[in-house]
Amino acid sequence: MSETIPIKAVKPKDYDSGVQPVWCAGCGNYGVLAGVYRALAELNIDPANLVNISGIGCSSRLPYFLKAYKMHTLHGRAGPVATGVKLARPDLEVLITGGDGDGFSIGGGHMSPLARTNINLTYVLMDNHIYGLTKGQFSPTSRKAMKGYTTPYGGFEEPLRPLLYMLTYGASYVAQAYAGNAKMCADLISGGLAHKGFAYIHILSPCITFNKLDTADYFKEIIEDIPADHDVSDLRKAMRLIYQFEDKEPVGLLYKNERPTLDEVMGEIVQQAGGSDHYNIREIINLSRP
Ligand SMILES: Cc1ncc(C[n+]2csc(CCOP(=O)(O)OP(=O)(O)O)c2C)c(N)n1
Ligand code: SF4
């Protein structure tokens, strides 16, 4: 007689660590956190197999509020740390969470290898167009009109286009959402977690305390749904769509393809070389004998 194993119902609140978020009331990051909870519940991911890694900033505090193994690392360094975790333990679900300054300014150099190597992990970036935790400096995604602590007369650089950047570097899943729509955040995050490869989810998340230019109303005005007939497997169409939207920001899934991941490729190399945990170190030492 076969025994039925009861399936434990998982709810979004099961992923709440119990640590009270320290974000300002009204911060967009609450919507992102709700989206992360929902996505994890939807996929029934065991917190014991989940690692959430962040850098530094308001957004990088997210791992404290999530029931998972977690690391709050250094500014801009979540990517390389997460790469190490995933390569050491490919069986774990690895999730990076952080901000626009963290990811695209100090961490910019680490962003491209994640996409190019197609490491199988998910990156949720909360973009408030400002440095929040350090009280309102110009970030790589700030608009020139933004007057902050370091730019009292406005900025002098054009804002970076993160979606184009990630598509150019070869991310195999690229999506954008607005933090005010927790349902869309959840759907795109769960799609990213389920995707085999590097998944990048860009979330427009207002900083109500320091960014008085790019407010919730501004974000709501500029977002526009990606048309339902958009072909997500076509890279050129994904790029063209971003240009076509011009002053608007497309929300939804932009691009998705499948190709070997870094952890898979590394595993294959080990196999080709006949590697095993019980290799004979003597053979290697003998190579150096005259
Ligand atoms: C090496 C280093 N440089 C600078 C800082 C100071 N610092 C802390 S948070 C931060 C930026 C925060 O902005 P962002 O990453 O956009 O996240 P947010 O706080 O807006 O969520 C900076 C520059 C730091 N902690 N480490
Ligand atoms: S300063 Fe801005 S980004 Fe930081 S918690 Fe407050 S509203 Fe959120």
Image: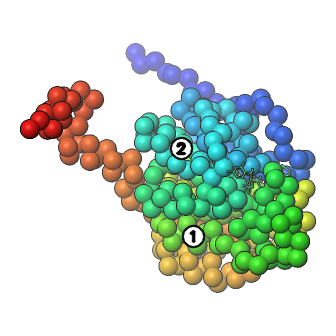
Up/down of 68 relative to 218, above or below: above
Q: Given the current orientation, which residue lies at the most extreme top position?
A: 1
Q: In which quarter of the image is residue 146?
A: bottom right
Amino acid under disc 1: Tyr
Of the pair 138 and 181, the residue shown nearer to us? 138
For mark 2, what is the residue? 81
C-alpha distance separating marks 1 and 2: 21 Å
Sooner in the amino-acid sequence: mark 1 or mark 2: 2
In which quadrant will I find the C terminus? Answer: top left
**Residue 280 percent coordinates (x, y):** 18, 28
**Residue 105 is drawn in which quadrant?**
bottom right
Between 107 and 17, which is closer to the camera in this rendering?
107
Q: Quick check: 130 left or right of 190?
A: right
Left or right placement of residue 35 versus residue 267 in this view: right
Q: Does the Cβ of the disc 2 residue fall within 8 Å of ligand 1? A: no
The dot on residue 165 is: 1
Residue 7, by quadrant, is top right
Q: Which residue is drawn at 36% across and 56% down?
A: 260
Q: Is residue 252 visible?
A: no
Residue 144 at x, y percent in the picture: 80, 77
Q: Is residue 225 left or right of residue 1?
A: right
Q: Residue at the spot x=83%, y=66% of the render?
A: 150
Q: Quadrant of the N terminus?
A: top left
Task: State which mark lies toward you, 1 or 2.
Answer: 2
Crowding near the residue tagged with mark 1, few <14, some 14–19, many ≥20 C-alpha atoms within 10 Å: some
Assign a secondary structure to mark 2.
helix
Q: Is residue 135 left or right of residue 114?
A: right
Q: What residue type is labelled 2?
A: Val
Report the colour scheme.
rainbow
Name which residue lies at 42% across and 42% down.
87
